[in-house]
Amino acid sequence: MAQIPAPIWQIPAQRHRVLVKICGLTLVDNALDCVKAGADIIGLVFFEKSPRHVSTAKAREIARALPKGVPACGVFVNETYNSIMQTVSACGLEIVQLHGAEPPDLAERLSAQNLVVTKAFFAAKPPKLCDTEKYPSADFCLAEYGKGILPGGNAETWDYNQALDMAKKVRLMLAGGLNPANVADAVARIHPYAVDVSSGVEKTKGIKDIAKVKAFVRAAKSVSI
Protein backbone atom coordinates (compact mmCIF):
# COMPACT_ATOMS: atom_id res chain seq x y z
CA MET A 1 0.00 0.00 0.00
CA ALA A 2 1.16 3.52 -0.71
CA GLN A 3 2.45 5.53 2.23
CA ILE A 4 -0.03 8.28 3.03
CA PRO A 5 1.36 11.34 4.82
CA ALA A 6 -1.85 12.82 6.26
CA PRO A 7 -2.34 11.96 9.97
CA ILE A 8 -5.88 10.66 9.38
CA TRP A 9 -4.47 7.76 7.38
CA GLN A 10 -2.21 6.42 10.10
CA ILE A 11 -3.56 3.06 11.16
CA PRO A 12 -3.60 2.79 14.97
CA ALA A 13 -3.76 -0.53 16.80
CA GLN A 14 -7.47 0.01 17.36
CA ARG A 15 -9.69 2.33 15.33
CA HIS A 16 -12.80 3.77 16.87
CA ARG A 17 -14.36 6.09 14.28
CA VAL A 18 -15.01 5.70 10.58
CA LEU A 19 -13.53 8.16 8.09
CA VAL A 20 -16.03 10.22 6.07
CA LYS A 21 -15.55 11.13 2.40
CA ILE A 22 -17.91 13.74 0.96
CA CYS A 23 -17.82 13.39 -2.81
CA GLY A 24 -18.92 15.44 -5.80
CA LEU A 25 -17.95 18.92 -4.60
CA THR A 26 -17.98 21.71 -7.18
CA LEU A 27 -17.47 24.90 -5.13
CA VAL A 28 -14.64 26.00 -2.86
CA ASP A 29 -16.80 27.42 -0.08
CA ASN A 30 -19.07 24.38 -0.09
CA ALA A 31 -16.05 22.07 0.17
CA LEU A 32 -14.61 24.06 3.07
CA ASP A 33 -17.96 24.01 4.84
CA CYS A 34 -17.96 20.21 4.49
CA VAL A 35 -14.52 20.10 6.11
CA LYS A 36 -15.76 22.28 8.98
CA ALA A 37 -18.68 19.86 9.33
CA GLY A 38 -16.24 17.01 9.86
CA ALA A 39 -15.41 15.57 6.42
CA ASP A 40 -12.07 13.73 6.34
CA ILE A 41 -11.76 13.54 2.54
CA ILE A 42 -13.13 15.71 -0.26
CA GLY A 43 -14.02 14.00 -3.54
CA LEU A 44 -13.80 15.70 -6.94
CA VAL A 45 -15.43 14.02 -9.92
CA PHE A 46 -13.65 14.12 -13.29
CA PHE A 47 -16.18 11.95 -15.13
CA GLU A 48 -17.61 14.31 -17.78
CA LYS A 49 -21.05 12.69 -17.91
CA SER A 50 -21.62 13.27 -14.22
CA PRO A 51 -23.70 16.29 -13.14
CA ARG A 52 -21.05 16.74 -10.46
CA HIS A 53 -18.22 16.95 -12.98
CA VAL A 54 -15.67 19.60 -12.06
CA SER A 55 -13.15 21.29 -14.35
CA THR A 56 -9.44 20.95 -13.75
CA ALA A 57 -9.20 24.64 -12.91
CA LYS A 58 -12.01 24.49 -10.36
CA ALA A 59 -10.67 21.24 -8.89
CA ARG A 60 -7.26 22.85 -8.44
CA GLU A 61 -8.87 25.78 -6.66
CA ILE A 62 -10.76 23.47 -4.29
CA ALA A 63 -7.79 21.20 -3.60
CA ARG A 64 -5.48 24.11 -2.83
CA ALA A 65 -8.03 25.60 -0.42
CA LEU A 66 -8.31 22.46 1.69
CA PRO A 67 -6.56 22.53 5.07
CA LYS A 68 -3.55 20.30 5.68
CA GLY A 69 -4.59 16.80 6.58
CA VAL A 70 -7.77 16.83 4.47
CA PRO A 71 -6.82 15.29 1.12
CA ALA A 72 -8.53 15.78 -2.22
CA CYS A 73 -9.58 12.60 -4.02
CA GLY A 74 -9.99 12.61 -7.78
CA VAL A 75 -12.69 10.26 -9.09
CA PHE A 76 -12.02 8.83 -12.56
CA VAL A 77 -13.94 6.38 -14.75
CA ASN A 78 -11.96 4.32 -17.28
CA GLU A 79 -9.36 7.04 -17.87
CA THR A 80 -5.82 6.35 -19.07
CA TYR A 81 -2.76 6.52 -16.85
CA ASN A 82 -1.44 9.61 -18.63
CA SER A 83 -4.76 11.44 -18.38
CA ILE A 84 -5.06 10.70 -14.68
CA MET A 85 -1.50 11.75 -13.94
CA GLN A 86 -1.97 15.03 -15.81
CA THR A 87 -4.97 15.82 -13.63
CA VAL A 88 -3.17 14.72 -10.47
CA SER A 89 -0.27 17.01 -11.27
CA ALA A 90 -2.47 19.96 -12.25
CA CYS A 91 -4.69 19.74 -9.17
CA GLY A 92 -2.36 18.41 -6.50
CA LEU A 93 -4.46 15.33 -5.76
CA GLU A 94 -3.34 12.91 -3.05
CA ILE A 95 -5.89 10.19 -3.73
CA VAL A 96 -7.06 8.65 -7.00
CA GLN A 97 -10.35 6.76 -7.13
CA LEU A 98 -10.85 4.36 -10.02
CA HIS A 99 -14.62 3.96 -10.40
CA GLY A 100 -14.90 1.98 -13.60
CA ALA A 101 -13.56 -1.25 -15.10
CA GLU A 102 -9.89 -0.27 -14.79
CA PRO A 103 -7.33 -3.10 -14.98
CA PRO A 104 -5.18 -4.02 -11.96
CA ASP A 105 -2.00 -2.79 -13.62
CA LEU A 106 -3.38 0.77 -13.74
CA ALA A 107 -3.88 0.75 -9.98
CA GLU A 108 -0.35 -0.60 -9.61
CA ARG A 109 1.19 2.11 -11.80
CA LEU A 110 -0.62 4.86 -9.89
CA SER A 111 0.39 3.39 -6.55
CA ALA A 112 4.02 3.40 -7.75
CA GLN A 113 3.70 7.19 -8.04
CA ASN A 114 3.09 7.35 -4.26
CA LEU A 115 -0.59 8.04 -4.78
CA VAL A 116 -3.27 6.57 -2.56
CA VAL A 117 -5.42 4.37 -4.77
CA THR A 118 -9.09 3.61 -4.14
CA LYS A 119 -10.63 0.99 -6.45
CA ALA A 120 -14.38 0.57 -6.76
CA PHE A 121 -16.05 -2.85 -6.78
CA PHE A 122 -19.72 -3.43 -7.51
CA ALA A 123 -22.54 -5.66 -6.37
CA ALA A 124 -24.29 -5.53 -9.75
CA LYS A 125 -21.47 -5.50 -12.33
CA PRO A 126 -17.73 -6.17 -12.77
CA PRO A 127 -15.41 -5.81 -11.08
CA LYS A 128 -17.47 -7.63 -8.47
CA LEU A 129 -17.18 -7.33 -4.71
CA CYS A 130 -15.28 -10.63 -4.65
CA ASP A 131 -12.57 -9.38 -7.04
CA THR A 132 -10.49 -7.37 -4.56
CA GLU A 133 -7.61 -9.88 -4.60
CA LYS A 134 -6.98 -8.93 -8.22
CA TYR A 135 -6.04 -5.41 -7.07
CA PRO A 136 -3.39 -5.89 -4.34
CA SER A 137 -2.02 -2.36 -4.85
CA ALA A 138 -5.35 -0.68 -3.95
CA ASP A 139 -5.12 1.12 -0.61
CA PHE A 140 -8.91 1.25 -0.31
CA CYS A 141 -11.56 -0.99 -1.82
CA LEU A 142 -14.85 0.81 -2.33
CA ALA A 143 -18.06 -1.22 -2.29
CA GLU A 144 -20.80 0.27 -4.49
CA TYR A 145 -24.10 -0.96 -5.92
CA GLY A 146 -23.33 -0.23 -9.59
CA LYS A 147 -26.86 -0.53 -10.95
CA GLY A 148 -27.76 3.14 -11.51
CA ILE A 149 -27.46 5.33 -14.59
CA LEU A 150 -24.13 6.76 -13.44
CA PRO A 151 -21.08 4.88 -12.07
CA GLY A 152 -21.85 6.49 -8.69
CA GLY A 153 -24.00 9.15 -7.06
CA ASN A 154 -27.29 7.47 -7.89
CA ALA A 155 -28.72 7.43 -4.34
CA GLU A 156 -29.43 3.72 -4.83
CA THR A 157 -29.46 1.82 -1.54
CA TRP A 158 -28.46 -1.84 -1.63
CA ASP A 159 -27.81 -4.79 0.66
CA TYR A 160 -24.69 -3.59 2.46
CA ASN A 161 -24.34 -7.03 4.05
CA GLN A 162 -22.85 -8.11 0.72
CA ALA A 163 -19.75 -6.11 1.71
CA LEU A 164 -19.23 -7.90 5.04
CA ASP A 165 -16.63 -10.26 3.62
CA MET A 166 -14.75 -7.36 2.02
CA ALA A 167 -14.58 -5.54 5.35
CA LYS A 168 -12.75 -8.51 6.86
CA LYS A 169 -10.11 -8.61 4.13
CA VAL A 170 -9.44 -5.05 2.92
CA ARG A 171 -9.61 -1.41 3.93
CA LEU A 172 -13.25 -1.00 2.97
CA MET A 173 -14.91 2.23 1.88
CA LEU A 174 -18.69 1.74 1.87
CA ALA A 175 -20.74 3.71 -0.67
CA GLY A 176 -24.06 3.75 -2.50
CA GLY A 177 -27.28 5.19 -1.14
CA LEU A 178 -25.90 6.24 2.23
CA ASN A 179 -27.58 9.16 3.99
CA PRO A 180 -27.90 10.60 7.51
CA ALA A 181 -30.73 8.21 8.34
CA ASN A 182 -29.02 4.92 7.43
CA VAL A 183 -25.27 5.45 7.79
CA ALA A 184 -25.01 4.65 11.51
CA ASP A 185 -26.71 1.30 11.01
CA ALA A 186 -24.50 0.52 8.00
CA VAL A 187 -21.34 1.36 9.95
CA ALA A 188 -22.48 -0.71 12.94
CA ARG A 189 -23.20 -3.75 10.76
CA ILE A 190 -20.37 -3.64 8.21
CA HIS A 191 -17.52 -1.94 10.14
CA PRO A 192 -16.02 -0.18 7.10
CA TYR A 193 -12.82 1.81 7.35
CA ALA A 194 -14.53 4.73 5.58
CA VAL A 195 -17.90 5.77 4.17
CA ASP A 196 -18.48 7.73 0.97
CA VAL A 197 -21.53 9.93 0.31
CA SER A 198 -22.58 12.31 -2.45
CA SER A 199 -26.27 12.54 -3.35
CA GLY A 200 -27.33 11.57 0.17
CA VAL A 201 -26.25 14.97 1.53
CA GLU A 202 -27.04 17.22 -1.43
CA LYS A 203 -29.13 20.34 -1.82
CA THR A 204 -28.79 20.15 -5.60
CA LYS A 205 -26.38 18.09 -7.69
CA GLY A 206 -22.86 19.21 -6.86
CA ILE A 207 -23.96 21.42 -3.96
CA LYS A 208 -24.02 19.88 -0.49
CA ASP A 209 -26.58 20.69 2.18
CA ILE A 210 -24.32 21.41 5.14
CA ALA A 211 -27.02 20.55 7.67
CA LYS A 212 -27.24 17.11 6.06
CA VAL A 213 -23.44 16.82 5.97
CA LYS A 214 -23.26 17.58 9.70
CA ALA A 215 -25.99 15.03 10.41
CA PHE A 216 -24.23 12.43 8.26
CA VAL A 217 -20.85 12.93 9.90
CA ARG A 218 -22.37 12.91 13.36
CA ALA A 219 -24.28 9.69 12.66
CA ALA A 220 -21.33 7.92 10.98
CA LYS A 221 -18.90 8.77 13.76
CA SER A 222 -21.35 7.97 16.55
CA VAL A 223 -20.60 4.28 16.08
CA SER A 224 -17.48 2.74 17.61
CA ILE A 225 -15.91 0.17 15.32
Image (tube, grey):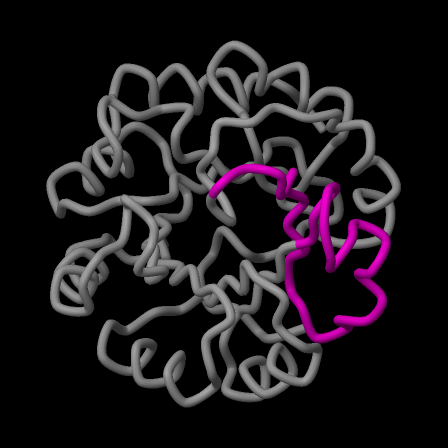
Task: Give the quarter of the figure containing the C terminus.
Answer: top right
Residue 27: x percent and y percent? 14, 45
Name which quarter of the figure residue 38 lies in. top left
Above or below: residue 161 compared with residue 81? above
Above or below: residue 176 compared with residue 111? above
Residue 140: say if magenta: yes
Residue 120: say if magenta: no
Residue 22: x percent and y percent? 39, 39
Residue at the spot 54% in from the left edge and 25% down from the top edge: 178
Which residue is more in the foreground, 77 or 109?
77
Q: Is residue 130 left or right of residue 69?
A: right
Name which quarter of the figure residue 131 lies in. bottom right
Which residue is more in the foreground, 114 or 27?
27
Q: Is residue 217 left or right of residue 1?
A: left
Residue 188: x percent and y percent? 72, 20
Residue at the spot 20% in from the left edge and 61% down from the top edge: 59
Residue 40: x percent and y percent? 41, 43
Residue at the spot 73% in from the left edge and 28% down from the top edge: 160
Pick out the residue farthest to the top: 181
Pick out the residue farthest to the front: 149
Task: Give the quarter of the figure containing the N terminus.
Answer: bottom right
Residue at the spot 79% in from the left edge and 38% down from the top edge: 163
Could you tell me how many numbered marks the image carries? Answer: 0
Q: Is residue 181 left or right of residue 47?
A: right
Q: Which residues are magenta?
A: 121-149
Above or below: residue 187 compared with residue 116? above
Which residue is more in the foreground, 225 or 181?
181
